[in-house]
Amino acid sequence: MTVPDIAITVAAKDAASRTFSVTVPPEKVRRAEDDATSHFARQARLPGFRKGKVPRDVVRKRFADAIRQTALEDLVRETWLKAKDQESLKPIGDPQVRNLSFVDGAPLTFELLVDVKPELALERLGGFRLGRHVHRVTDEMVEAQLLQLREQKAPWLPATERAKPGDLVEATIVNLDEAAAEAQEPVRFVLGQGRGLPDLEEQLMALDAGGSWEGSIRFPDDHPDVARRGHSRRVRVTLHEVKRQEIPELTDDFAREAGPFEAVADLRQAVRQDLEESGRRESDAEVRSQLVEQLAAANNVSVPPSLRDRAVLAYAKAYGVPEAQLQPFVNEMTPVVEASVRRDLILDAVAEKEKLACTEQELDARIAELAARRSEKPATVYAALEKAGRLRELERSITEEKVFAHLLALSEVEDAPAAHH
């Protein structure tokens, strides 16, 4: 005899989710339970019976809960496959089962809730006016970058004068308000970077190396630890050593140490090129961002709340946000994530509509390019990217480049007045 089939109807839908109402007739449930019983009968090992020879009613009694659970899982899986096929779904992740009713002799009923990839109807892809800000690199910016480079390579040398902001101090601080004021470990930090309390830094700058001071220091009203704000503590401070950075002169020798440069002029030129390249990347990112905003507005693209919320919670999980801080995190991240999801939806829709997805040949060509730059074999680079789980990322970036190249050719980009970078 034919067993009546599972009935699936769409109970609710939005651009990014579907809810299905499911009814499984009792005969279908019985059939699933019979199949599960047969499975357990083949596997069962019980005292007094050979494997696979345990009577079915004994198996049913002994494994009742497991049989029900297996039958339920099989029926949910079958329903999901049927719903996917029936509705031609592009699901994002597995479905959720809700409002389950599983009573002997009655139909099994439940709801399946699934997030799906939204279909975007992008009518207008071009004819936008975009402004490109050219980030002009000035001589001052080049010199500031060179100074930063010299500071990074500057050694810390003992100083004979008293400490000042920017110096590295080593000191011992003993809390005199605690009964056991035993010797503490020395602390090391750079003055003027907010690492020490203002009162403490002031006293350290008034001491000679080897000198001590006893007195009260006050925690400021904006101290990160709320319980300490405005409170004072009696301490003994001993300054052991002061070190100061000796910034090297900008000479041809320094340039040679900094990289493959013969003279200061070569280093200066390389720094300027780096700043210009970084300015170009910034300009490109701004143009792309304007383009996505105008595309979203022209095509009335909205981000389905279910998709946005799912993405926000995925970020919270990835960052390990504790339960107590979840709501502030969600409030802060929602607009940022919404913009990011909107961008991805638009780029995916354009890639699909215009057939611009990264091809295998393009991926191979990019990997060969990376390999040549690193003087490695393409197979080595491919294996490293695969191991790090970064192949999808590379594919995605190639697809995005193709999508933006296509879109920018359909719009007008004007150079806006130069902006200082």
Image: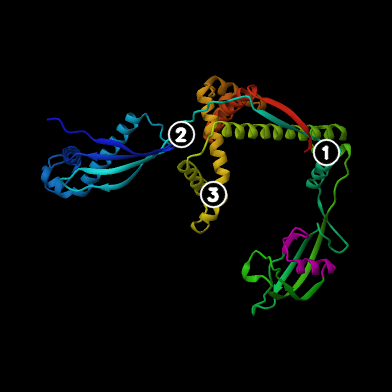
Q: Which residues are magenta?
A: 187-210
Q: Amino acid at mark 3?
A: Tyr
x, y percent for residue 321: 52, 53
Residue 10 occupies which quadrant of the picture? top left
Circle 3 residues within 10 Å: few <14, some 14–19, many ≥20: few
x, y percent for residue 234: 72, 77
Going from the N terminus, do you reach mark 1 or mark 2 first?
2
Q: Amino acid at mark 2?
A: Pro
Q: Is residue 163 above or below residue 130?
A: below
x, y percent for residue 414: 73, 27
Mark 3–mark 2 CB contact (< 8 Å): no
| Magenta stretch: includes residue 181 | no
Nearer to the camera, 125 or 73? 125
> In the current view of this chain or complex, which residue is farthest to the top?
361
* Residue hosting label 2: 118
Task: Give the position of the N terminus as an image quadrant.
Answer: top left
* Residue hosting label 1: 142
Circle 2 residues within 10 Å: few <14, some 14–19, many ≥20: some
Mark 1–mark 2 CB contact (< 8 Å): no
Task: Give the position of the C terminus as an image quadrant.
Answer: top right
Which callout, 3 or 2, points to the residue nearer the camera? 2
Under circle 2, the secondary element is loop
State the scheme by which the image is colored.
rainbow
Nearer to the camera, 406 or 123? 123
Which callout, 1 or 2, points to the residue nearer the camera? 2
| Magenta stretch: includes residue 202 | yes
Measuring 42% from the left and 36% from the top, which residue is drawn there?
Answer: 116
Residues under labels 1 and 2: Cα distance?
Answer: 47 Å
Tag shown at residue 319:
3
